[in-house]
Image: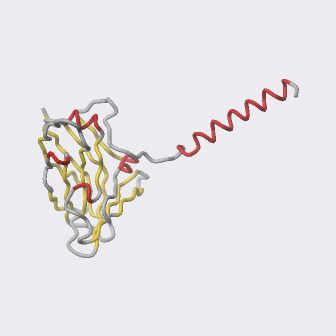
Amino acid sequence: MKDRIFFPLAFLLVVGMVVLAIWPAIGRLPDGPITGDGTNYDRVTVSGQFLNKILAGGDATTELVRNRGDDYLLYIEAQAGLLGPEPEDGPHFRLASDLEVQFSGRRVRCTVRMRPADQRGAMQAKVNYSVGREGDSGWQVFDLVSDFENFSFEYVVPEHIGDQGFDYFAIRPVVPEKSRALLVESVTFERIE
């Protein structure tokens, strides 16, 4: 085979192999634990497509939906009596080890911007910051309003001793009967000095 044919064909073959290798990652939504990515840990916000990092846990439904402004919102729905009492038994985010280290022994303000869903909207939501065996903030219950609003609480995160597990941040609707749902626009963690 002549060089003028061989080298262009070899180039096309290499380009094709690279495209096939990265094809599954194109358009893929982020997943895995929430991380600060080595940036400013004083304020870490999870919004947009990064809300996809939530784990449904239990028998809850979580879904990334688009709002009218073409931005992502997190839809969370649960049925009465199907979620366990532990934060990781329902919808929750796992916090990566870099956040665990940065928040360990510190006061952290947790803010969730949320509202009831349009269908079967929850009137209340509850959130919890958990460090596993070392304790949690307890369930913080908030009365929701029709528009997006910020709901915050502060928690002194216990210092991690020994091997670290995962820290969790759980969000779920309060479900008195049948099923209820809510929409989350963002979750923010702020270290308070």
Would you identify the image quadrant in which residue 36 lies?
A: top left
Residue furthest toward the front? 162
Please state the horizontal and vertical placement of residue 78, each as a whole percent of the image.
Answer: 29, 67
Which image quadrant is residue 19 in? top right
Q: Position of residue 162 (x, y in %)?
A: 19, 35
Placement of the N terminus among the 4 image quadrants? top right
Q: Which residue is drawn at 24% across and 44% down?
A: 167
The front one of 135 and 182 is 135
Q: Residue shown at 13%/54% (left/top)? A: 138
| Residue at the limit of the structure toward the top, as seen here | 3
Image position, residue 158 (x, y; %): 13, 40
Residue 116 coordinates in the image, percent (x, y): 27, 63
Q: From the viewer's side, name the closer residue of 110 and 3.
A: 3
Give the camera-side residue of 52 and 120. 52
Instruction: Tell me what residue is drawn at x 52 percent, y 46 percent.
Output: 27
Colouring rule applied to residues = secondary structure
Instruction: Find residue 90 and report its image quarter.
Output: bottom left
Which residue lies most toward the bottom here? Answer: 178
> How many discs mark residues in the rendered view?
0
